[in-house]
Amino acid sequence: MTTTVAASTAVEPAERATVRRSWTQHGLLFIAPFLAIYVMFLLWPLVYGLWASFTSVNIAGTNAEFIGFANYAEALSDPRMWTSLWNTVLFTVLSTIPLVLLGLALALLVHNLKFMRWLWRLSFFSSFLLPSAVVALLWRQMIYQPDFGLLNQLLGTDILWLGDPGMAMWSVVLTTVWWTVGFNFLLYLAALQSIPEHLYEAAAIDGATAWHKLRYITLPMLRRTTGLIVVLQILASLKVFDQIYLMTGGGPGDSTRPIIEYAYDVGFTGYRIGYASAVSYIFFILIVVVSLVQLRLFRKRAEGVS
């Protein structure tokens, strides 16, 4: 009897190892299609782009001579690169603030409504579902059109909203806020619905006003959601391309051209893939630095609150 138990005990680890190996093989087969797509469309472009940034390769893949940091040195001394980077930062600042505040305001409005909430949720979120091409065509041809556009008709003006260097960036920001505020609105609305109702009931018993409830209950409970929205919004705004490319093409002049469009222009119009890759990696480093700074700030704030 003892010999049988010992033999079965000795066999169990081998069986478990066989089962574990079988599950591992099946798991690898299961995720193999995703891994293939991931490597093909993300890892390989990253590696190839990094290699290309140190060469003089063109769009045809020829003349790929290793030139070291020459592309990076040229990019850092290129005034058009710095202009496009400034446009990207300016767009991020101008769009992030209203998108966060307006998203919060709309969520508070809908959360406190007592009737037809579904209609308001649909109204505020539906614009976010539109493709960028539709949004650009709608605002460019129907709202910002100088001669018969809706905005000039309402204001009684003849402003070149997309043709004036002083107005083009503001116009694109306005379009972006209208287009994407629904996403932040939805995140805030979900966070508001998760706040325990008994907190407001206890505050009402203590005689708290609506302003006190907002200041001392709602906003503190939304602190983590606000941090998440700010991070996501900054990263999304830094990567702006579609609406600017479709509405202004980066113009007039270079007044609205973001750095991603500049990299696209020098790579696919100027055929300089190596230089475009260097510009892209400079921007990539900027995004990494911004992300790390934000992570550190929010971590310190969380530690301070706790």
Image: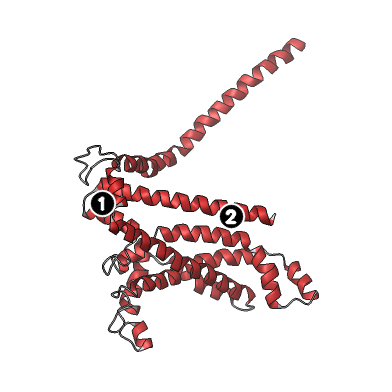
Q: Amino acid at mark 1?
A: Gly
Q: Answer with the quarter of the image where residue 104 lies.
A: bottom right
Crowdedness of circle 1 by 10 Å Cα count: few (<14), some, many (20+)? some
Instruction: Give the vertical position of 203 relative to 58 (above or below).
Output: below
Instruction: Give the vertical position of 73 relative to 211 (above or below).
Output: above
**Extreme residue toward the front, this view:** 77
Quarter of the picture containing the N terminus is top right
Q: Nearer the viewer, residue 274 or 11?
A: 274
Q: Secondary structure at mark 2?
A: helix
Crowdedness of circle 2 by 10 Å Cα count: few (<14), some, many (20+)? some
Q: Secondary structure at mark 1?
A: helix
Residue that badge 2 annotates: 298
Name the residue at 62% across, 53% down.
300
Name the side, left or right, on which 191 lies relative to 203: left
Q: Position of residue 66 (x, y in %)?
A: 25, 37
Name the residue at 58% across, 26% down.
19
Q: Position of residue 155 (x, y in %)?
A: 38, 87
Name the residue at 28% across, 39% down.
68
Q: Are marks 1 and 2 in contact (CB under 8 Å)?
A: no
Q: Amino acid at mark 2?
A: Phe
| The label number, if any, that marks residue 267 in the structure image | 1
Q: Position of residue 82 (x, y in %)?
A: 33, 58
